[in-house]
Image (cartoon, helix red, strand yellow):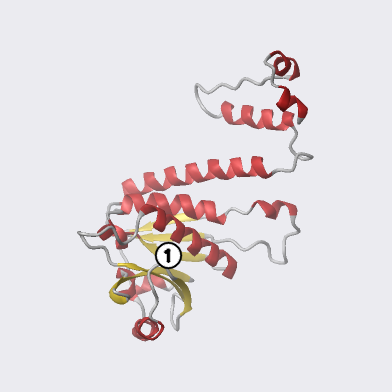
Protein backbone atom coordinates (compact mmCIF):
# COMPACT_ATOMS: atom_id res chain seq x y z
CA UNK A 1 0.00 0.00 0.00
CA UNK A 2 1.43 3.36 -1.08
CA UNK A 3 0.81 6.82 0.38
CA UNK A 4 0.95 9.60 -2.21
CA UNK A 5 1.02 13.28 -1.22
CA UNK A 6 -0.65 15.94 -3.36
CA UNK A 7 -0.18 19.62 -2.54
CA UNK A 8 -3.00 20.62 -4.87
CA UNK A 9 -6.54 19.31 -5.19
CA UNK A 10 -8.84 19.33 -8.21
CA UNK A 11 -11.73 17.53 -9.85
CA UNK A 12 -9.21 15.92 -12.18
CA UNK A 13 -7.41 14.36 -9.20
CA UNK A 14 -10.67 12.83 -8.01
CA UNK A 15 -11.18 10.92 -11.23
CA UNK A 16 -8.55 8.37 -10.27
CA UNK A 17 -10.14 7.59 -6.89
CA UNK A 18 -12.63 4.91 -5.97
CA UNK A 19 -13.65 6.66 -2.73
CA UNK A 20 -12.98 9.86 -0.79
CA UNK A 21 -13.25 10.44 2.96
CA UNK A 22 -15.57 13.43 3.46
CA UNK A 23 -16.19 14.75 6.99
CA UNK A 24 -19.39 16.71 7.61
CA UNK A 25 -19.32 18.92 10.70
CA UNK A 26 -22.58 19.39 12.59
CA UNK A 27 -24.03 22.02 14.92
CA UNK A 28 -27.12 20.74 16.77
CA UNK A 29 -27.24 17.86 14.27
CA UNK A 30 -27.42 20.35 11.38
CA UNK A 31 -24.57 20.49 8.82
CA UNK A 32 -22.48 23.60 9.43
CA UNK A 33 -19.45 22.75 7.32
CA UNK A 34 -18.53 20.17 4.70
CA UNK A 35 -15.04 18.91 3.96
CA UNK A 36 -12.95 21.05 1.62
CA UNK A 37 -13.00 18.03 -0.70
CA UNK A 38 -16.78 18.40 -0.98
CA UNK A 39 -16.38 21.49 -3.19
CA UNK A 40 -14.50 19.42 -5.79
CA UNK A 41 -17.29 16.90 -6.22
CA UNK A 42 -19.65 17.05 -9.17
CA UNK A 43 -22.56 19.48 -8.61
CA UNK A 44 -25.12 16.67 -8.68
CA UNK A 45 -23.14 14.71 -6.10
CA UNK A 46 -22.90 17.79 -3.89
CA UNK A 47 -26.67 18.15 -3.99
CA UNK A 48 -27.10 14.44 -3.32
CA UNK A 49 -25.00 14.67 -0.15
CA UNK A 50 -26.82 17.79 1.02
CA UNK A 51 -30.18 16.07 0.52
CA UNK A 52 -28.93 12.96 2.30
CA UNK A 53 -27.93 14.96 5.37
CA UNK A 54 -31.19 16.89 5.33
CA UNK A 55 -33.47 13.85 5.04
CA UNK A 56 -31.53 11.33 7.16
CA UNK A 57 -30.49 13.80 9.89
CA UNK A 58 -27.37 11.87 10.93
CA UNK A 59 -25.82 12.35 14.35
CA UNK A 60 -22.21 12.88 15.38
CA UNK A 61 -20.22 9.67 15.25
CA UNK A 62 -22.08 8.12 12.33
CA UNK A 63 -20.30 7.04 9.14
CA UNK A 64 -21.82 6.08 5.79
CA UNK A 65 -20.45 4.73 2.53
CA UNK A 66 -22.50 6.43 -0.19
CA UNK A 67 -22.45 5.75 -3.93
CA UNK A 68 -21.92 8.85 -6.07
CA UNK A 69 -22.76 9.49 -9.72
CA UNK A 70 -19.35 10.75 -10.80
CA UNK A 71 -15.74 10.06 -9.84
CA UNK A 72 -14.91 9.24 -7.15
CA UNK A 73 -17.56 6.57 -7.23
CA UNK A 74 -18.10 6.59 -3.46
CA UNK A 75 -17.93 8.95 -0.51
CA UNK A 76 -17.13 7.66 2.96
CA UNK A 77 -19.00 10.32 4.93
CA UNK A 78 -18.17 10.90 8.61
CA UNK A 79 -20.33 13.11 10.79
CA UNK A 80 -18.88 14.95 13.78
CA UNK A 81 -19.61 18.03 15.90
CA UNK A 82 -18.19 21.30 14.65
CA UNK A 83 -15.28 22.31 16.91
CA UNK A 84 -15.85 25.49 18.90
CA UNK A 85 -13.32 27.25 21.17
CA UNK A 86 -15.35 26.87 24.36
CA UNK A 87 -16.07 23.15 24.09
CA UNK A 88 -14.16 19.92 23.69
CA UNK A 89 -15.78 18.80 20.46
CA UNK A 90 -14.79 17.95 16.91
CA UNK A 91 -12.29 15.25 16.05
CA UNK A 92 -9.75 14.02 18.55
CA UNK A 93 -6.71 12.02 17.47
CA UNK A 94 -8.39 8.85 18.75
CA UNK A 95 -11.57 9.54 16.77
CA UNK A 96 -9.55 10.29 13.66
CA UNK A 97 -7.48 7.12 14.05
CA UNK A 98 -10.62 5.00 14.35
CA UNK A 99 -12.19 6.78 11.38
CA UNK A 100 -9.20 6.02 9.15
CA UNK A 101 -9.37 2.36 10.18
CA UNK A 102 -13.08 2.18 9.34
CA UNK A 103 -12.45 3.86 5.99
CA UNK A 104 -9.65 1.49 4.99
CA UNK A 105 -11.52 -1.63 6.13
CA UNK A 106 -14.59 -0.57 4.17
CA UNK A 107 -12.48 0.23 1.10
CA UNK A 108 -10.71 -3.12 1.28
CA UNK A 109 -13.98 -5.02 1.68
CA UNK A 110 -15.40 -3.23 -1.38
CA UNK A 111 -12.30 -3.94 -3.44
CA UNK A 112 -11.34 -0.28 -3.85
CA UNK A 113 -7.83 0.24 -5.18
CA UNK A 114 -7.35 3.99 -4.71
CA UNK A 115 -8.85 6.14 -1.97
CA UNK A 116 -8.33 9.71 -0.82
CA UNK A 117 -8.09 11.75 2.40
CA UNK A 118 -7.93 15.56 2.61
CA UNK A 119 -5.55 16.25 5.49
CA UNK A 120 -6.42 19.87 6.25
CA UNK A 121 -10.02 19.18 7.31
CA UNK A 122 -9.03 18.63 10.93
CA UNK A 123 -7.14 21.84 11.67
CA UNK A 124 -10.12 23.35 13.53
CA UNK A 125 -9.83 20.34 15.85
CA UNK A 126 -6.14 21.22 16.31
CA UNK A 127 -4.93 18.16 14.42
CA UNK A 128 -2.63 19.56 11.77
CA UNK A 129 -1.66 18.02 8.46
CA UNK A 130 1.63 16.50 9.61
CA UNK A 131 -0.07 14.71 12.48
CA UNK A 132 -3.01 13.64 10.32
CA UNK A 133 -0.55 12.16 7.81
CA UNK A 134 1.12 10.16 10.59
CA UNK A 135 -2.23 8.94 11.96
CA UNK A 136 -3.47 8.07 8.47
CA UNK A 137 -0.37 6.05 7.56
CA UNK A 138 -0.22 4.23 10.89
CA UNK A 139 -3.90 3.35 11.18
CA UNK A 140 -4.40 2.53 7.51
CA UNK A 141 -1.53 0.05 7.72
CA UNK A 142 -2.97 -1.46 10.90
CA UNK A 143 -6.45 -1.74 9.39
CA UNK A 144 -5.22 -3.34 6.16
CA UNK A 145 -3.54 -6.20 8.06
CA UNK A 146 -5.31 -9.57 8.09
CA UNK A 147 -3.50 -12.41 9.87
CA UNK A 148 -5.94 -15.06 8.66
CA UNK A 149 -5.05 -14.66 4.98
CA UNK A 150 -1.88 -16.75 5.30
CA UNK A 151 -3.98 -19.75 6.37
CA UNK A 152 -6.63 -19.45 3.64
CA UNK A 153 -6.67 -20.29 -0.04
CA UNK A 154 -6.52 -17.04 -2.02
CA UNK A 155 -9.73 -16.32 -3.95
CA UNK A 156 -9.73 -16.15 -7.73
CA UNK A 157 -8.00 -12.91 -8.63
CA UNK A 158 -6.18 -12.70 -5.31
CA UNK A 159 -6.93 -10.91 -2.05
CA UNK A 160 -8.59 -7.52 -2.07
CA UNK A 161 -6.01 -4.79 -1.52
CA UNK A 162 -6.06 -1.01 -1.26
CA UNK A 163 -3.16 -0.12 -3.52
CA UNK A 164 -2.85 3.64 -2.97
CA UNK A 165 -4.03 6.21 -0.45
CA UNK A 166 -3.87 9.74 -1.85
CA UNK A 167 -3.32 12.43 0.77
CA UNK A 168 -4.31 15.98 -0.21
CA UNK A 169 -3.02 19.10 1.55
CA UNK A 170 -1.86 22.66 1.00
CA UNK A 171 1.07 22.16 3.39
CA UNK A 172 4.69 21.39 2.50
CA UNK A 173 5.16 17.73 1.71
CA UNK A 174 8.65 17.21 3.24
CA UNK A 175 7.45 17.06 6.86
CA UNK A 176 4.45 15.00 5.79
CA UNK A 177 6.72 12.43 4.16
CA UNK A 178 8.70 11.95 7.37
CA UNK A 179 5.52 11.56 9.42
CA UNK A 180 4.15 9.01 6.97
CA UNK A 181 7.36 6.97 7.19
CA UNK A 182 7.19 7.02 10.99
CA UNK A 183 3.54 5.97 10.98
CA UNK A 184 4.22 3.10 8.59
CA UNK A 185 7.23 1.95 10.62
CA UNK A 186 5.24 1.79 13.87
CA UNK A 187 2.31 0.00 12.24
CA UNK A 188 4.51 -2.55 10.47
CA UNK A 189 6.24 -3.33 13.77
CA UNK A 190 2.87 -3.77 15.48
CA UNK A 191 1.63 -6.00 12.66
CA UNK A 192 4.75 -8.15 12.94
CA UNK A 193 4.10 -8.57 16.66
CA UNK A 194 0.47 -9.43 15.91
CA UNK A 195 1.65 -12.16 13.55
CA UNK A 196 3.97 -13.64 16.18
CA UNK A 197 1.30 -13.45 18.89
CA UNK A 198 -1.39 -15.04 16.70
CA UNK A 199 0.76 -17.83 15.26
CA UNK A 200 -0.38 -21.29 16.43
CA UNK A 201 2.10 -22.96 18.85
CA UNK A 202 2.47 -25.84 16.42
CA UNK A 203 3.85 -23.40 13.82
CA UNK A 204 5.85 -21.11 16.09
CA UNK A 205 7.72 -23.00 18.78
CA UNK A 206 9.90 -21.27 21.44
CA UNK A 207 12.95 -21.69 19.23
CA UNK A 208 11.14 -19.90 16.42
CA UNK A 209 10.21 -17.00 18.70
CA UNK A 210 13.83 -16.69 19.81
CA UNK A 211 14.99 -16.67 16.21
CA UNK A 212 12.42 -13.95 15.37
CA UNK A 213 13.85 -11.80 18.17
CA UNK A 214 17.40 -12.34 16.90
CA UNK A 215 16.35 -11.43 13.35
CA UNK A 216 14.89 -8.13 14.54
CA UNK A 217 17.92 -7.33 16.69
CA UNK A 218 20.29 -7.90 13.78
CA UNK A 219 18.56 -5.09 11.88
CA UNK A 220 18.88 -2.52 14.68
CA UNK A 221 22.13 -0.96 15.78
CA UNK A 222 23.09 -1.43 19.46
CA UNK A 223 20.19 -3.81 20.13
CA UNK A 224 21.10 -7.22 21.56
CA UNK A 225 18.99 -10.24 22.47
CA UNK A 226 19.64 -12.71 25.28
CA UNK A 227 17.78 -16.03 25.00
CA UNK A 228 17.23 -18.13 28.13
CA UNK A 229 17.59 -21.83 27.33
CA UNK A 230 16.03 -24.59 29.43
CA UNK A 231 19.01 -24.70 31.78
CA UNK A 232 18.88 -20.94 32.41
CA UNK A 233 15.11 -21.00 32.95
CA UNK A 234 15.50 -23.69 35.60
CA UNK A 235 18.28 -21.74 37.30
CA UNK A 236 16.06 -18.64 37.41
CA UNK A 237 13.11 -20.60 38.81
CA UNK A 238 10.89 -19.83 35.82
CA UNK A 239 8.90 -23.02 36.21
CA UNK A 240 5.64 -21.63 34.76
CA UNK A 241 7.38 -20.90 31.46
CA UNK A 242 9.00 -24.33 31.46
CA UNK A 243 5.62 -25.97 32.09
CA UNK A 244 4.16 -24.51 28.87
CA UNK A 245 7.29 -24.53 26.74
Relative to the observer, which residue lies in front, 94 or 131?
A: 94
Residue 234: horizontal and vertical position, in percent?
Answer: 73, 16
Q: Looking at the image, is 165 positioned above or below residue 228?
A: below
Q: In which quadrant of the rendered view does residue 228 lie?
A: top right
Residue 114: horizontal and vertical position, in percent?
Answer: 49, 65
Q: In which quadrant of the rendered view does residue 31 lie?
A: bottom left
- Spot the residue most to the top: 235
Q: Looking at the image, is 128 positioned above or below residue 54?
A: above
Judged left or right of residue 125, residue 70 is right
Judged left or right of residue 231, residue 74 is left
Q: Badge 1: how crowded within 10 Å, few (<14), some, or many (20+)?
A: many
Residue 164: horizontal and vertical position, in percent?
Answer: 49, 60
Q: How many marks?
A: 1
Relative to the observer, which residue lies in front, 6 or 236?
A: 236
- Residue at image point 44% right, 61% down: 99
Q: Is residue 17 visible?
A: no
Q: Secondary structure at mark 1?
A: strand
Relative to the observer, which residue lies in front, 228 or 184?
A: 228
Question: Where does the C terminus fall, quadrant-wise?
Answer: top right
Q: Is residue 227 visible?
A: yes
Q: In which quadrant of the rendered view does residue 5 lie?
A: bottom left
Residue 100: horizontal and vertical position, in percent?
Answer: 45, 59
- Residue at image point 41% right, 48% down: 180
Q: Looking at the image, is 201 positioned above or below residue 119?
A: above
- Residue at image point 47% right, 53% down: 139
- Residue at image point 77% right, 27% down: 243
List the residue tagged with mark 1.
Answer: 116
Q: Looking at the image, is 147 positioned above or below residue 209?
A: below
- Spot the residue most to the right: 202
Amino acid sequence: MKFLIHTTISKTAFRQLDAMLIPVFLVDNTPARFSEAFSYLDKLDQQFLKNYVKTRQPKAGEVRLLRLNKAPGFAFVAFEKEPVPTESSGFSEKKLALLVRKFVRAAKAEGFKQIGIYLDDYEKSNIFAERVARLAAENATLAHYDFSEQFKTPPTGGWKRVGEIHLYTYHEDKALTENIKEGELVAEAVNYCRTLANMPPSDLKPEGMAEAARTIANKIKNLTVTVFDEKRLKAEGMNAILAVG
